[in-house]
Image (cartoon, grey):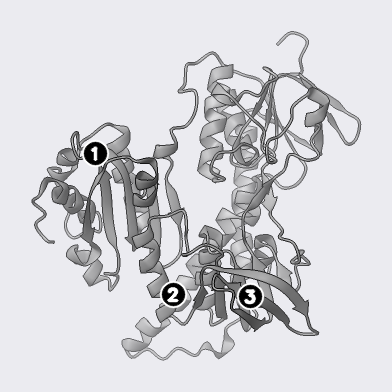
Amino acid sequence: MAGFDYDVVIIGSGPGGYVAAIRASQLGLKAAVIERDRVGGVCLNIGCIPSKALIHQAELFRSIPGLEAMGIAVDKRGFDYSKVFEKSRKAADTLSKGVQFLLKKNKVELIAGEAVLSGANEVTLKSGKKVSGRTIIVATGSRPREIPGFPFDEQRVLSSTGALMLEKLPKRILILGAGAIGVEFSHIMSSFGVEVHLVEMLDRILPLEDAESAQVLARSFQKRGITISTGTKALSLQKGPSSVSVALEDKAGARTTVEADQVLVVVGRTPNTDSIGLEKVGIATEKGFIPVGDFYRTKVPSICAIGDVVATPLLAHVASKEGEIAVEYIAGRSPEPRLDPLSIPSAVYCEPQVASFGLPEWKAAEKGIAFAKASFPYRGAGKSVAIEQSEGFVKVLYDPKTKEILGAHAVGAEATELIHELLLARTAELLPSDVASMMHAHPTLSEAVMEVMRAVEGWAIHA
């Protein structure tokens, strides 16, 4: 480390940055993290964690009819959404403090401030202080993306951040964007009685997921009274004193106007690469993302980039794993040079949950990859009936010759947990027959995983 303050200097303390820092310290490197805001980044503070806290509270609220069916009288007149908000902030604060503790425990120095790159081995804080590192890792994350005509004011036009910080719910909300964030907020808002209209420019909700899984979710949403408009784009916005009017146009060219109290725009995220000094070190972005090679190194060998600033899926677990790969390489280890895109799990926390990894059918067909498939309905697993959550299925795509697992998809209760047994099988290069013959406890939802693998082999018992 001769001549440098640290072995590794990381800009950003989100799930990419803080995991990279802790792993670096475990590997004997002297590490520092520079953070301009709250430790934990978007995920812990205004993303994954508080949104899942809201979802948990929403599902408790949705359990009221089940209690009433048992003869329990529930008086909802005292419901106060600000209490739900407070619980979400408590979860975020608890975990942010937990990360600070972990950094301190692992002897990672936390430097408060906003940093920009000022050299191949140096960053400069707004205060003027310079910090040097043998390697610098850019992990500055992303922010909600705006669309023309719908600038965020966090009053009438909300970003995901604004939606998470609401202490009072609107009566009507229009949600633009039906990816994971859009459907999760639809679930939350609808659960608490908000009238939800969900709009997606592409032909179906969750356009990157398995089409059949998306159909199951769409049917469930529609039963709950959520209005869904796919193949539809938002043209313009007019703000009134207490509401907004949004002009929509479907793919046939028909136009309608929707009135709502607020609009939530969740059409993607923008990488935070525009004011971090990349130009000073000769790094040019591509569509806002930092180009990287193996081990997430940029064209400047001493600078790496991980997480939402690179063109990989903008997911917290992707950022964390990229951080681990980068620092293991820096420490002289020999990790895999980059993530296998077919082994990245996707998880959508609505009701029913949607989870997947690998190839969906539409992408396999698009790439000309031969595949066979098997699916097993949730209702065939006894526990799903017992807990009154029998909606959904588990599906596996596999090579018809070798039976190698090409992808898996689950929609239903606890799908975001079940998917990992299938992913482990693929990662360990197991065949469907290996999982099919493994005893699973009864009754469990994971029996659906066993049965879908038996379906591949042609001997599902409960189908």
Q: Residue 32: percent from the left, percent from the top?
A: 70, 28
Q: Nearer the viewer, residue 333 or 196?
A: 196
The amino acid type of the residue labelled 2 equals Phe
Per the model, the C-alpha gap separating discs 3 and 2 is: 20 Å
Where is mark 2, residue-wise? 221
Q: Where does residue 401 sit, x and y in percent of width and height?
A: 18, 35
Q: Nearer the viewer, residue 360 or 376?
A: 360
Q: Secondary structure at mark 3?
A: strand
Q: Are marks 3 and 2 in contact (CB under 8 Å)?
A: no
Residue matched to label 3: 248
Tell which of 177 and 35 is nearer to you: 177
Residue drawn at x 39%, y 54% as measured from the top left: 355
**Cα separation between marks 1 and 2:** 33 Å
**Residue 263 in which image quadrant:** bottom right
Q: Which mark is residue 13?
A: none
Q: Decide: marks 1, 2 in contact (CB < 8 A)?
A: no
Q: Dividing the picture into quarters, in which one does residue 12 lie?
A: top right
Q: Secondary structure at mark 1?
A: loop
Q: CA distance from mark 3 to mark 1?
A: 42 Å
Depicted 417 relative to depicted 70: above or below: above
Quadrant occupied by the C terminus? bottom left
Does 251 appear above or below 439? below
Seen from this angle, which residue lies furthest front? 252
Residue marked by disc 1: 399
- Say which of 277 and 7 sits in front: 277
- Would you say residue 358 is visible in this rendering? no
- What is the total number of numbered labels drawn onto the structure image? 3
Work out whether mark 3 precedes mark 1 in sequence or the reverse, and give the earlier one: 3
Q: Position of residue 447 (x, y in %)?
A: 20, 55
- Tell me the kind of residue under disc 3: Leu
Query: Are the residues at dot 3 and dot 1 in contact (C-beta closer than 8 Å)?
Result: no
Instruction: Examine the rendering and report whether any part of residue 225 can be seen.
Output: yes
